[in-house]
């Protein structure tokens, strides 16, 4: 069925690796397509909403901070709730169809944001954006490249997620300048086109659901690493191991400060006296560092102990985030804090698929990542509202900053004392003697 849906591929390399002198393996074109989908789809999707928050506060002065920041949490919550469904569907149906539906819904939602007049319209557009984003966000792309790449899994996941961060880095500076030149409603019309047209083109022209549907073998098939991860545990089998829950806890606690700050940074800096364009440039710097961190940590994951890399990422978050306490009185601390914190934040997200394959294998990756995506998205959805509620109560960011620092250091303790380097050999996803897929 999948083969009939796809036009034939050009004559790319059919082996597991790029043979010398032959065309590049088609897996690298799949990676390029995923980069475009992440860069324009997710990068110009949810991060467009966070960039417009200062203008929403000005346009609707009667709205509480919780109402202003609610769309981000609603979007992420919808994505999280739908993640198990999407993960289940990705293991059974065409990824291309999931992409197309998600792109169309997301573009429609961004256009509707340009016509918002009431709180109910504001939240309705956010709800539709969350549904659409479920089909173009990180989960489908991680499953897609994990099918095509059986080697360099860390690097590939880092590159894809760097595209998300790069889109998030470009979006604040670009959108803020676009709004200043036009207005925020007109900017959303432009964003709807940017988030729709490039991803749709690459899905139609390049994306294939799997190497088998294109008559190819995965990149790196036949290696020892590929053999180890070719099989795998089901979700029911995986949740029987404490490592599954410890990793979930570290994702949640480590993600809380990341998703709180990246949604509040423009308002936080604005209250310290930074101009809108200047604050947007600092936010872009934060995500640019994050993009570099994702590629670097992904590359290192193919060469280093993956559990220790996760620990390093969370330590960077736990050390970098509290430095923001000093910014009001020592502005020179802002850039070092953004660099440390951004690097840790950048490494955390690619660690989710990398360590999932490392611990539990690839056979049921869609379902497993769907479960972990719920954990990550609950943190991402609750963190901005948690901070907004405490801000409304205390009138400042100090108290929520203390709480988020505690969460980050609890994540460090979880990894140090609870997460093994590898599951016991008798429970490894597949024996090394098993032939590669």
Image: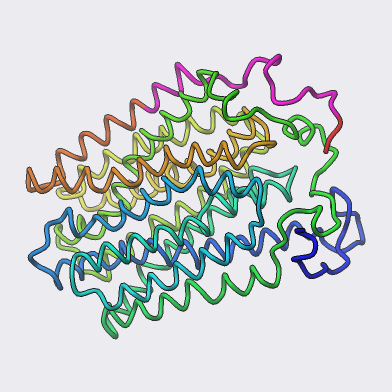
Q: Position of residue 114 (x, y in %)?
A: 30, 77
Image point (64%, 35%), residue name = 357
Image point (56%, 42%), residue name = 297
In the rendered image, which quarter contains the N terminus?
bottom right
Image point (40%, 44%), residue name = 377
Q: Position of residue 186 (x, y in %)?
A: 31, 83
Q: For residue 379, which quarter of the picture?
A: top left
Q: As rendered, which of 275 and 51 lies closer to the eye?
A: 51
Q: Residue furthest right?
A: 21
Does the segment drawn in magenta span residue 137?
Answer: no
Does the segment drawn in magenta span residue 433?
Answer: yes
Highlighted range, magenta: 411-434
Q: For residue 188, which quarter of the picture?
A: bottom left
Q: Is residue 176 left or right of residue 166?
A: left
Look at the picture and state if 207 lies above or below 416: below
Q: Residue furthest front?
A: 1
Image point (71%, 68%), residue name = 206
């Amino acid at each position: 069925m999948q083969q009939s849906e796809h036009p034939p591929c050009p004559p790319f390399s059919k082996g597991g690796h790029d043979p010398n002198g032959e065309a590049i393996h088609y897996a690298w074109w799949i990676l390029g397509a995923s980069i475009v989908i992440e860069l324009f789809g997710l990068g110009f999707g949810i991060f467009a909403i966070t960039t417009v928050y200062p203008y929403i506060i000005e346009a609707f002065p009667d709205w509480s901070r919780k109402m202003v920041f609610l769309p981000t949490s609603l979007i992420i919550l919808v994505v999280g709730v739908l993640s198990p469904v999407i993960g289940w569907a990705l293991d059974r149906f065409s990824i291309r169809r999931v992409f197309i539906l998600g792109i169309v819904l997301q573009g429609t939602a961004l256009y509707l944001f340009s016509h918002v007049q009431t709180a109910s319209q504001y939240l309705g557009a956010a709800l539709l954006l969350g549904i659409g984003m479920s089909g173009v966000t990180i989960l489908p792309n991680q499953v897609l490249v994990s099918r095509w790449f059986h080697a360099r899994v860390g690097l590939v996941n880092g590159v894809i997620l760097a595209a998300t961060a790069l889109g998030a880095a470009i979006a604040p500076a670009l959108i803020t300048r676009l709004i200043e030149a036009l207005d925020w409603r007109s900017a959303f019309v432009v964003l709807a086109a940017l988030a729709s047209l490039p991803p749709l083109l690459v899905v139609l022209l390049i994306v294939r659901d799997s190497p088998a549907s294109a008559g190819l073998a995965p990149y790196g098939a036949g290696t020892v690493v590929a053999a180890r991860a070719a099989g795998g545990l089901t979700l029911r089998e995986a949740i029987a191991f404490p490592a599954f829950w410890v990793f979930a806890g570290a994702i949640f606690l480590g993600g809380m400060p990341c998703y709180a700050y990246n949604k509040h940074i423009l308002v936080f800096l604005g209250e310290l006296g930074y101009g809108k364009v200047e604050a947007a440039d600092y936010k872009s710097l934060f995500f640019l560092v994050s993009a570099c961190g994702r590629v670097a940590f992904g590359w290192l994951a193919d060469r280093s102990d993956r559990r220790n890399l996760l620990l390093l990422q969370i330590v960077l978050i736990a050390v970098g985030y509290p430095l923001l306490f000093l910014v009001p009185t020592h502005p020179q601390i802002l850039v070092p804090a953004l660099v440390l914190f951004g690097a840790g934040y950048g490494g955390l997200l690619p660690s989710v698929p990398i360590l999932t394959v490392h611990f539990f294998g690839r056979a049921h990756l869609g379902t497993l990542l769907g479960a972990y995506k719920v954990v990550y998205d609950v943190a991402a959805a609750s963190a901005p509202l948690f901070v907004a509620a405490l801000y409304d109560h205390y009138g400042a960011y100090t108290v929520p900053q203390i709480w988020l620092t505690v969460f980050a250091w609890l994540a460090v303790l979880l990894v140090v004392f609870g997460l093994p380097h590898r599951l016991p050999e008798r429970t490894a996803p597949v024996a090394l003697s098993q032939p590669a897929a």
